[in-house]
Image (cartoon, rainbow, N blue to C red):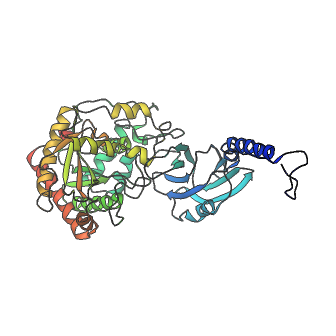
Amino acid sequence: MADFTGTPFAGISAQGLARRRILATATTLLVLPVVPRLAMAGTILAVRTWPADEYTRVTLEMDSELKAEHFTLENPHRLVVDIDGLSMSSKLNDLVSKVRPNDPYIASVRVGQNRPDVIRMVLDLKQPIAPQVFTLKPIGEYKYRLVLDLYPQIAQDPLVAIANSFQDEDPLADVLESLAQNAPNTAPIPSVDGQTLPSTPPAAKKPATPPQPPAVVTPTPTPSNRPVLVALDAGHGGEDPGAIGPRGTREKDVVLSIAKRLKKLIDAQPNMRAYLTRDADYFVPLHVRVQKARRVKADLFISIHADAWIKPSARGSSVYALSQNGATSTTARLLAKKENDADLIGGVNLGSHNKQVAKVLLELSTSAQISDSMKVGGNVLSEIGKINRLHKKSVERAGFAVLKAPDIPSILIETAFISNPEEERLLRSSAHQDRIARAMLAGINGYFASSPALARRT
C-alpha cells in the first residue's frame, strides 16, 4: 500500500507489501468479471425494417438479450416500446431514417432516453395494429434480435386479395368471391393475438365462430370452366436471406424474381392464373404459406428455391415432393432440415400464431397428394433438364413442412446451386430466369394436360 506519492506506508516491510499486492490483485481478478457486466449497457448492432401490406417488421439486433415492454395508445394510434439496458446510439437514430414513406403501418418513429438504461421508442401509426413484440436468440449470422411485428388489427384474407386482383369478367374472380362468402373457415386465415378475422360478406353473414383446425375432407367440386390456380411460393424473404452466393447474390431475391416471371407467364395463359404467397421482400412463416394456398383453393403449390453446398463444385437443378416415411436420400433429408429451419432464421413468434392450427396443418398429408406431387414433379424436372444440368435425375422426397397441404399437389424446386460460381452467374441473368420460368410452365402444362389436379376432382 502507498500514499498518493507512491511511497510505502511506514511500518510495512517490502516483503509484506508484495504479499498484500498479490492478495489485492487476486481479489480484483475475482471481482472484475461480475461488476462491469452489471454496469455494461447493451449495444445495438443493426436496425432493419421490412414494410409489406401483410405486416411491417422492425428488427433491432443486439449483442445481448434485453427486456422490452410495450403498449399501444389511441387518438392518434401509437406503439410505445421501452427497452431495458440500452442507451442512445447512432444505430438507434438510424431507425428514424429507415421508415419508408410507403410503409402501410408506420408514419414515423421517435427514439429517446426515457430514464437511465431505458430507451423509449414511439412508433406513430397509420392504422390500428395488433403488435407482436418478442425476442429471438442467436442463430446463423444473427445475434440477439428484438422483433416488432405490426399486423393490421383486422386480418387480411388472401382470398379477397387475389379476387380483387382479377378483372370482373375473369371466371376465377366469381369462384373466389363465392368461396369468400360461403366458406369463410375452409382454411383458417393466418391471425395473431389481438387480431380479428375479417367479417363475412353481407350476402353470407353468419354467427362468428373461432377458426377450427382444418380437416382432411373430399375436395368440393369447382366449376370445370374456371381457370387453374397455381400458388407460387418464393422461398425465404425478409430477415431470412436464404443461401448467399460467392458474389453476394441472395437466394430470396433470385427466387422472388423467378416467381414473378412465372406468374406473368401463367397469367397470360387463357385457362390459368397464379397467386404469390409473398410478392415482396418480407418473411412468411412456413405454415402460413400453406394456409394461404389452401385458402385460395390452389390446384398446385410450387415452392421455388436455390440450393447451396459447402463445395462450390456442386451444381444442377432438383425437384422434391413430400415424404411421410423418411427421406429418399441423405441429401434430401439435410435439405429438408435446412428449409424447415427457415422459421428459426426468419423469426416466428410461437406465442402469437395459432400453434394448434399450425401443428395440425403441418401433420396432414395424403397419399393422393403425394402421388400427384410426384407426377407434376416429374414433368417439371424433365423440362428443367432441357435448359440446365440436373443434380438429381428423379424427384426426391423428404419431410418439407411447406409441402404438407393435404389437398394440393405440392413440389419444391431447387433451380440451381447459388453456391456454384457459374450457376450463380446464370441465376443473376434475366434471360436464364426467363428460361427457368418457361421450363416450369411447360412442366405445369404437361401435368394438367395428362392428369386432373387433385383439388379439382369431384
Could you say where residue 206 lies in the image, as x and y percent from the top left? 43, 33
Could you say where residue 108 lies in the image, as x and y percent from the top left? 61, 61
Q: Is residue 288 left or right of residue 267?
A: right
Q: Is residue 249 visible?
A: yes
Residue 20, quarter of picture: top right
Q: Is residue 217 left or right of residue 43?
A: left
Q: How many badges with numbers are in the image? A: 0
Residue 35, quarter of picture: top right
* Of residues 429 and 3, the one drawn nearer to the viewer in this rendering: 3
Could you say where residue 360 lies in the image, as x and y percent from the top left? 35, 30
Could you say where residue 353 lies in the image, as x and y percent from the top left? 46, 38
Q: Is residue 251 left or right of residue 26?
A: left
Residue farthest along the left direction in this orientation: 450
Check the image and report above or below for 346 versus 110.
Answer: above
- Position of the C terminus by quadrant: top left
* Of residues 3 and 193, the one drawn nearer to the viewer in this rendering: 3
Q: Which residue is at 33% across, 42% downward?
A: 290
Q: Which residue is at 70% across, 42% downward?
A: 26
Q: Is residue 409 visible?
A: no
* Of residues 422 and 196, the one drawn nearer to the viewer in this rendering: 422
Check the image and report above or below for 148 versus 194.
Answer: below
Q: Which residue is at 27% across, 61% downward?
A: 258
Q: Which residue is at 26% across, 38% downward?
A: 399
